[in-house]
Structure formats: structure tokens, C-alpha cells
Image: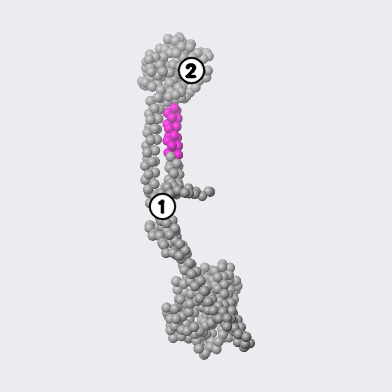
Amino acid sequence: MKRLIKPAGLNKPFRDWWGTFVGVRSRILVWYFLLTTGITFVSVYATYQIFCDSTQRELGGQLQRDVVAFQQIVEQQQQSGTQTLNTEALRDTLNTFLAQQVPNSNRHLLVVFNGQILYPPQLERAYFVQQNQAAIQRWINLATSSAYQLDGYSIRVMQPLELNGPRQGMIIAIHDVTMRYQMAELTLRIVIKVTLSGLILFMTIAWFTAGRLLAPLRQLKETAQMITETDLSERMPIRGNDEIAELTDTFNQMLDRLQAAFTSQQDFIKDVSHELRTPITIIQGHLEFLEDDPNERAATVALVRDELKRMNRFVNDLLLLMRTERPNFLRFSVVDLEPFTQELFTKAKGLAQRDWQLEAVGSGEMMCDRQRLTQVIMNLAQNATQYTQTGDAIALGSAISNDIVRFWVRDMGEGIALEDQERIFNRFARGTNNERRSEGSGLGLSIVQALVKAHHGHLELFSRLGEGATFTIFLPRQRTEALDPSQPYPFQKER
């Protein structure tokens, strides 16, 4: 379908008029107008045709009965021999028959005998006969009979008159329906005029009603036009609870997500720039003052290598965070929890000289990415060593309850302030209550949280200043939908 383009080079009022004329509201109303008009006129025409057909059947049936009754009377007279068949006798029989019928100025019966038309006295001066002499003469000359036929506004029934032999004449019954059809056509024209007037009134009301209904869409367009790459704060007010209100709410939610993504992107760029600026400055400063002394050269090279190694680790961490958002990032396999926990504890003990404790070991199997989950636990254990002293206790453990697997790392270090407990999971964030003790990039806990979410799990932190911190990981035992962190887990204890 080709896109409708507004004419270029026109002033704004004309462009606005053109947009209104070809807009959704106009197209909907035009199609509804055409559809309603078509259905209305088809219905009116069908009603008129049904009226015509029923009129023809009703009046034609009455005429047919008159013709048959008159034919039977003539045959009875001939068979009884009471009357000789001639013109005058047929005229008298016709007058007698009509005198016995209910008078009707629009219904006529005439007989053609030996080429002569026999009119009843009242019909010879009738307006219908005077005006339709040519039509009556044409009917007489027809070689075959006809029934229930409409000629102009006259219904006629014709039947041959056969007495003691071949055809000797014709009986013609006529019903003048001019007045009835004229009234029907007049009614039809009135109905059409009233219908057109009603449609015009309806379309006028519908135009303004549709404008009110589509106002949120116009506001949606205006809001979208006001949104720029530096300002995503515009939102649409939600009115009612219909489909347009749902669309408005969906649009606002989309803007919220875009604003959050845009803000996150800006913060990310700022943080990356800040984190890379320090090692680049260090490398650049030492290279600028590099001297010929072999010892100083070796020291400078070692320092540059260390900074490059830190930058390389920083870039690898960023790539890992990016890959965690891919749907097929993890490689799931069946893991026996008991030996896996023992393996994690053995690896953790090699990180630093601490009082390592294995508090609990879960029994059973689970589905997870073994390497990535090991990375999560080791990151938490490494984080615990950075904020504890030699000989401080660090505990690890695992458990299974209600198809939920739980891992935890608990330390007895200095703890984390309440205002920092959510912020430390952000990229490049560190606690405000301690000095920097790690040479890392500040992405460790962000990576932990991203890997846990990739497993459709949830990470929980409980800490008080001076009492240490406990990081607890909740994971589904099987591959399933993400856990809802707002719902309490069956084995969680009140703190």
C-alpha cells in the first residue's frame, strides 16, 4: 500500500486542512458513510421490489379468479342451451357477472369476440380505457395467453375464450395500479430524502464525536514530536479505561523504558570514560618521561603492562555484561549440588587466609551453567575477602527447598550501609563507608547480578554496619521463568 504524502510547498493552514481531509477520521467516516448508504439503498430497493411482486401476485390472483369464474358461467350457459352464443349474449352475461361483483373502479373485465371488444357500460367511458386503447388493441393481437403481467402500471390476465371448438375470443382482466405505484414511488422518494438527511446529520455528529475519540491519538503524535534525544520526559495523560487509554499507557511505558535506557547509556558512557581515563593517563605520563635507565625502563614497562592488564580485564567485564542479555548466553547442564558445593568451597579457600566455613550442603540435582554459577560464587567470595581481615570468618552454603536452590556467602566484615545496599549492584559503584580496597573495575557485583538474572534467579543482600554481609542467591531448580523477588520464598526467615 502506497503511503499518502501531503503536498509539498503549501502553507501550514492548507497542510493542516489537507491532513484533516485525508486523516484517519475522514477515511473512517467516508467508508462508514458509503457502507451505510449502500446498505440503506439496497434495503429500500429490495423493499420496493418485494412490494411490487406481492402486489402483482395479489391482484393477479384476484383477476385470475374473475376470469375463471366468467369462463365457467359462459360454459354453463352453452352446455345448458339456455342462451345462444353471440355478441349481445356475451355482453349481457358480462354485465350480469360484473353486477354481482364488489364494485372496484380500478378493476376491469372485457371480452373480445369475433374481433369486437365487448365493454361493460361503465368501462366504455372509463379514463383507463380511453388512455390505453393502443395497449388493449396490442393485447388482443397477442397469439398466446399471458397471466400476471404488468404493462406500465396495469396488471393484466388474459385467457382464450373457447366454446364448443377452437378459440373464438379472449377474456381480458385488467387492474389499474397507477395510484398504488405512484404512492409507493412517492413514499420511496420521501424515504430516500429522509435517509440522506439523516445520514448527513449522522455524519456531522459522528465527525465531531470521532474527533473527540481520536484526540488522544493526535496528542500522542504531538507528544512524540516533542520528544528529542535530550528530553524524554514528556508523558501523555491517561483518561478512561478503553483501548485508547491502554495504548496511551503502553506508550508512556515505552517512553519510561526508553528514558531509562537512554539515561543508563549516558551513565555507562560517563563511567567507562572515567574508568579508562585513569589508566590511560598513567600510561601516557610514564611513557612521556621514559628515560634510558634500564631499571626505570623495566619498572615503567611493568607498570604499563599492569595498567593494560587492568584495562583488558575491564573491557572483558563489559563484554561479559553485554553478553548476559543474549538469550542463549548460558549453557545449561545437570549439576549434582553436593559435590558442586564442595568444589566451590575448595576453590574459595584459596582466595585468601580467612576462617572459611562450609555451613550447609544441599542434596539433589539442578539445571544451571556450571561455569557461570562458579563465577558468581567466586566473585562473592572474592568480594568478601576484600572487606575482611586475616582470620575473619567467611561462610558458604547451599540448600534446596520447594524446587528452589539457595547459595549464600556470609562474612563477618565491616558491613554495608543501608543506603549503599542497592547502589553497589550498579556498574562502577562502591560503598561510601570504606576506602577502595580493590583494584577491580567496580563491575563485580553487576556481573554477579546479571548472571543470576540470566539464570532466572534473584540476588538478595542483608547487611548491617559492623556485623558483616550475607549475599543469598535464589535459583529455580529447573529451567523456568524468572523468580519474582517481591514474593517471599518458603524457606526465607524473618530477620
Q: Is residue 362 visible?
A: no
Q: Which residue is drawn at 43% across and 18% down?
A: 132
Q: Is residue 435 above or below residue 318?
A: below
Name the one closer to the observer, 388 or 485: 388
Q: Which residue is drawn at 37% across and 21% down?
A: 104
Which residue bears the numbered disc 1?
Answer: 214
How far across and down, in percent of the image, does residue 135 sit? 46, 18
Q: Is residue 264 above or below residue 409?
A: above
Dot in front, 2 or 1: 1
- Marked residue nearer the N-terminal end (2 or 1): 2
Quadrant for residue 232, please give it.
Answer: bottom left
Q: In whole angstroms, how far apart are the C-alphas of marks 2 and 1?
A: 65 Å
Magenta-tinted stretch: 38-57
How far across and down, in percent of the image, does residue 22 sit? 45, 47
Asked which colour scheme the image uses, the reply is one colour
Left or right of residue 179, residue 318 in this image: right
Q: Main secondary structure of the magenta part?
A: helix
Which residue bears the numbered disc 2?
Answer: 138
Q: What residue type is labelled 1?
A: Leu
Q: Is residue 482 above or below residue 4?
A: below
Number of marks: 2
